[in-house]
Image (cartoon, rainbow, N blue to C red):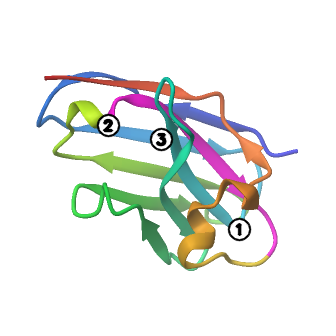
Amino acid sequence: QVQLVESGGGSVQAGGSLRLSCAASDYTSNMAWFRQAPGKEREGVAGINRGDVTTYADSVKGRFTISQDISQDFAKNTVYLQMNGLNPEDSATYYCAAAMGGWLRGGQLLSDDEYSFWGQGTQVTVAS
């Protein structure tokens, strides 16, 4: 069972930046960030596989950057989501997710069906 510990949410003015972090307790092949706003479906924001292949939702391309640090023994990874140019539409609860097995690519990285492990969520609020 992989545990995911998220941090970095908060409140910011429009145009501001936040950085989310998610530490995995064990090896994962793929990690991603999803978000869910009240009354809306959960959506994939950004994903990354162990080979550093990334995918972004169109709504965040050019503003958000996903990256990862892998431990020296290749056992664990921490994934980050740098969010710049935030706007009120980015306000949501952000969830980190992890998947084992083969490396996901493209749209698979943003499909919540592919992920078995989820963090507790961290709130991001962007004021206009």
Q: Secondary structure at mark 2?
A: helix
Q: Quadrant of residue 16?
A: top left
Per the image, the residue denoted by label 3 is 21
Q: Are marks 2 and 1 in contact (CB under 8 Å)?
A: no
Q: Is residue 97 magenta?
A: yes
* Residue 78 shown left or right of residue 56 in the figure: right
Per the image, the residue denoted by label 1 is 29
Looking at the image, residue 22 lies above or below residue 56: above
Q: Which of marks 1 and 2 precedes in the sequence? A: 1
Does residue 103 appear in this view?
yes
Q: Which of marks 3 and 2 precedes in the sequence? A: 3
Per the image, the residue denoted by label 2 is 90
| Stretch of the chain drawn in magenta | 90-101
Observer-side mark, 2 or 1, equals 2
Q: Secondary structure at mark 1?
A: loop
Gap in angstroms between the C-alphas marked 1 and 3: 17 Å
